Image: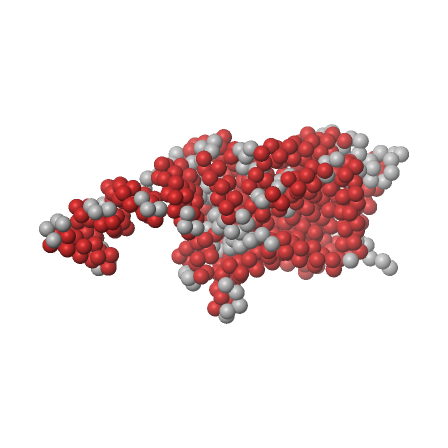
Amino acid sequence: MRKSNPTEAAKSRRVARAGAATPGRAPGEAGSAAAGPEWGWWWGGLLALAALRAALAIQPAPALWGLHAQAFVAPLFGWPLWLAAGLALWPPAATPMAGFLSALARALERAPALAIGVAAAGATLVLAFPDRLFYVGDFLLRRGAVRAAESPAVLSPQAFPLDVLLHYTLPLRAIQAGWLDAVAASRAIGALDAALLAAAALLLARALPVGPPARAAAFAVAFFGGALALMTGESKAFAEMAVLATGFAACGLLAMPPVGAGESREDAARRDLALLGAGACLGVGFFLHRLTLGLLPAWLLLVGWRLMRGRTPLSRSIPGLLAIAVPLVALAVVAPRLWSTALSYDVRANFSGSGAGGAGGVLARVLAPLHLLDVGNQLLFLSPLALIALLACLASAGRSRSSAPAFERIWIASLALPAAAVLLLLQPPQGVIRDWEAYAPSAAAISAAAAWAAAHAIERSRRAWLAAAVVLATAVPTIQWLAHFADRDRGLARLEVLMAGPPARPAEDRATTWNFIGWAHFRDQDFAGAARAFERACEVAPSPRLLTDWAMAETMAGRAERALDLYARAVERDSTYRLGWTGLGVSAINTGRPEEAARAARALERLDPANPKTREIADWVRQWEASGGR
């Protein structure tokens, strides 16, 4: 006897239900007329995004930074890719594209081993675009910690055990064994992450009871997004969290209880295995990062449905028991760490923003126009079609008969809503522009929900060509972002545009980013460019350190008098700043200002007498005094 496939069985039950609801239509066609407005929202939304991207490629607007990547990529990745995505919005051009996608989806169904090729393609994509900007989050700090064998407990005390294992212990062992250097190790882990993300997106697409074109679209929406840019060299747990969120969504959809009253014993066993997969994602996630807590509501719903609607008692299903036990045991093990990290770090660093003001101040910052604008930009960057999915679902609510059961829609909402809350409330310490990595896991969960919505919208509309438009609308901007971060010069140019505004970024964000830009130019020996960037940083926050950085760039640019003035400003702000006094002494000697050199020598002999540079400046001053001031 042929065993039933749970995905095919679920699809046949839902198609039968839809067909019975509208006599005279072909199976699977029911509700397509009512769903017309929904596909129109999708097509209109894709058209609007394409138009905005084109306009911003000509004149980038910092306010819409989530859409302006095309303005900061090499020509090869600009208009040709945009044109391909634009053509997919024209049905005669999109139809053959959709035919190719359908053929590929059917080939994957007939030969599941081809999934290895898809995973390899995902890994190849991120390997082709290594991050050369090093701007996001703690990129340089994490990589430097591995190179210097610095204890992660010192640099990242909030990191969880699996994060430390993947991004510190294993790379360090590879370096010590002579297999890889720090850069290659982080990129190898990222490539594996991309392969796993592709596999998880494939599993999610196969879990949906829709046709091949809609499954291709679901895969693209779940796979493509800004999270891939974390897999090109950045060494932190957020990339793995994006993979786990997608895998959890796929397993959760496979574990959905049946539509009808009965199911075979084989189907019930497969659902318990899928539930175990969801529980394993949750259990692993607890050891990786505390954002895993956002998946708990969806997991609790799955467990509740299993307890109420399972074909066999839970006590007789080993996978079912493990599905509950694994995350509970993991949570029990890490619960003290979760609690202490949430109270000692997250509340202060990630969910309160800068400044005081209590709950009212936090609420004001969350609802601030710039913050809300940045949240929208994050979604456009990390999950390109999430906003379209939301608008289409809201516009069609109550107008069209959904092809998904009510409990499945509720579960998708339980997956997306906590993620949306994190996006809204999160205010990372280095700002939204630099710490965008922290939003990636939540955006991955939202992308899974958007993939579900896109697939059902395409299936109900019976417009297969729309799948090609959806695939290219997610793939093209993602490839452009990958190309952007791999292009250091264009990456720096975009940061300068963002910091120049409008809108005006927070002062601290501008100061740290201009300082980052300054040091990037300094390392390139573009000392005039470095001086300009440091000057912009000091306009916002003229700290002794930033003034000293600026003075060093001016010195290397051959403007010693300017450097002397800047060192003087630095020590005026902090009379104990030894580096400032050292710079003042050296600049005074180079510009023939012995009185300033003597002042610097006296300060350094008090603050840092053992430093060789102190002795060098003091010796010069003594020789000058011995010569009678000549």
Q: Is residue 583 left or right of residue 341?
A: left
Colour scheme shown: secondary structure
Q: Residue farthest to the front?
A: 630
For this rendering, which residue is in front, 529 or 430?
Answer: 529
Q: Is 275 drawn above or below residue 370 in the view shown?
A: below
Q: Is residue 473 left or right of residue 523?
A: right
Across and down, in percent, residue 173 comes to 50, 67
Across and down, in percent, residue 367 comes to 49, 31
Q: Which quadrant holds residue 1?
A: bottom right
Across and down, in percent, residue 162 comes to 52, 58
Picture residue at 68% right of the left edge, 33% below the top: 47
Q: Is 91 drawn above or below residue 349 in the view shown?
A: above
Is residue 391 visible in the rendered image? The answer is no
Is residue 70 visible in the rendered image? The answer is yes
Q: Which quadrant holds residue 467?
A: top right
Q: Residue farthest to the bottom?
A: 177
Across and down, in percent, residue 415 comes to 62, 43
Picture residue at 57% right of the left edge, 49% below the top: 229
Picture residue at 80% right of the left edge, 31% below the top: 33
Q: Which quadrant holds residue 478?
A: top right
Picture residue at 45% right of the left edge, 46% below the top: 346
